[in-house]
């Protein structure tokens, strides 16, 4: 549901958010060869959800989602400044806000689980530190600070029977390259509770070293053989940590909207400029997925223009791509 919210707002030049019910209806309208979406992944912030809402209001949201024919899978905790949280590498007050956002997400997860609309999925987080410049001032200490925050967050999640997945994007400090992401996961050192969320669009930028040239695995003008060798190298490192997965397409560019810093650009699944063979790339991440507790796959179209999201063809194209992932890799639940 977060493509209806991320990068949206009421500031000059921003598009307005798309309501939860409209996003549910757009999801429900998609269909390819009799297959429809079976569930949603869900962003726990306004205007879709008030993270401090009472139990009855949250049960009402769960009822709405169920009436539309969907389960709820992974949840996105509102960890960023301007929502509930703040930087995971900030001062004690900022880190306490970050942890409070995780607590709120765990509470809502529990209500959805008890309701029955949610039976699987993780809670998604990141470092909530936009950009890498501040992190670079003392990279080692700042990574240690983020790891400390993540460990505390993981303890909270474990107490609620939940797992956290840190989504690797080039815009999040300490998570902005495949190597820095791996270093952070290893520094946290809680693989049963805190893992990695792989997004095809974002991890493609990892290969190019966009915010960490020293960790680039590909050079411009690379061959197809060089691409797949680099892709295997990256996924071999991060796949053991991967507990949640986003199908997506990328054209090799970065994109930002609103307060969201530039990150890997999500493109329509059938974009002629897309650089990724979605089904083949997905296989590198989904190998042995069930053994890591992955029970569903999701698509992400963050910062798609509203007009693009209003087109049924947009949703059908990604549903078709996800069906191909399932066909090739034995998956059976599509969000």
Image (cartoon, rainbow, N blue to C red):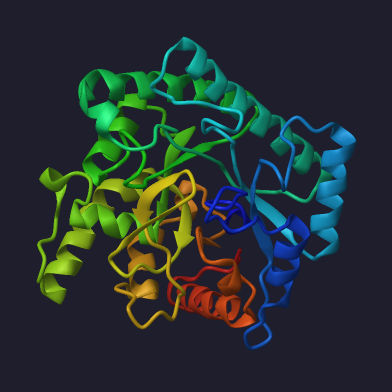
Spot occupied by residue 296 in the image (x, y as percentages of width and height)? 57, 58
Q: Quadrant of residue 69?
A: bottom right
Q: Is residue 211 left or right of residue 263?
A: left
Foreground of the two, 285 or 25: 25
- Decide if residue 312 is on the left or right side of residue 164: right
Residue 72 vs residue 168, the one in the foreground = 168
- From this viewpoint, which residue is outermost toward the top? 92
Is residue 73 among the parts visible in the rendering? yes
Q: Quadrant of the C terminus?
A: bottom right
Viewer-proximal residue, 1 or 287? 1
Tell me where residue 229 appears, x and y as whole percent.
Answer: 15, 64
Report the residue at 60% width, 34% height from top: 162
Please determine whether, in this image, residue 239 is positioned above or below residue 224.
above
Residue 24 location, x and y as percent? 73, 63
At a point 47% along the width and 43% down the height, the residue shown is 259
Which percent across, then down, holds residue 37?
Answer: 66, 70
């Amino acid at each position: 549901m977060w493509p209806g919210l991320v990068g949206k707002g009421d500031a000059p030049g921003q598009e307005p958010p798309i309501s939860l019910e409209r996003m549910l209806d757009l999801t429900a309208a998609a269909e390819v060869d009799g297959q429809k979406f079976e569930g949603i992944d869900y962003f726990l912030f306004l205007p879709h959800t008030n993270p401090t809402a009472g139990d009855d209001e949250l049960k009402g949201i769960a009822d709405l989602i169920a009436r539309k024919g969907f389960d709820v899978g992974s949840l996105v905790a509102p960890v960023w400044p301007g929502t509930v949280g703040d930087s995971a590498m900030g001062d004690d007050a900022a880190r306490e806000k970050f942890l409070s956002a995780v607590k709120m997400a765990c509470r809502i997860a529990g209500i959805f689980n008890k309701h029955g609309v949610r039976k699987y999925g993780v809670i998604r987080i990141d470092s909530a530190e936009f950009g890498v410049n501040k992190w670079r001032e003392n990279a080692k200490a700042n990574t240690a600070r983020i790891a400390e925050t993540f460990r505390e967050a993981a303890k909270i999640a474990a107490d609620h029977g939940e797992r956290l997945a840190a989504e690797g994007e080039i815009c999040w400090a300490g998570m902005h390259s495949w190597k820095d992401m791996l270093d952070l996961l290893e520094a946290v050192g809680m693989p049963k509770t805190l893992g990695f969320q792989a997004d095809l669009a974002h991890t493609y930028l990892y290969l190019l070293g966009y915010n960490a040239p020293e960790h680039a695995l590909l050079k411009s003008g690379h061959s197809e053989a060089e691409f797949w060798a680099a892709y295997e190298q990256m996924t071999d490192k991060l796949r053991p940590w991967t507990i949640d997965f986003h199908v997506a397409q990328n054209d090799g560019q970065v994109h930002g909207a609103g307060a969201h810093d530039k990150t890997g650009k999500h493109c329509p699944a059938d974009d002629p400029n897309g650089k990724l063979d979605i089904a083949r790339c997905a296989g590198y991440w989904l190998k042995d997925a069930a053994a890591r507790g992955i029970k569903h796959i999701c698509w992400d179209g963050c910062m798609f223009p509203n007009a693009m999201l209003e087109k049924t063809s947009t949703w059908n194209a990604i549903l078709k791509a996800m069906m191909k992932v399932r066909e090739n890799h034995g998956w059976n639940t599509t969000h």
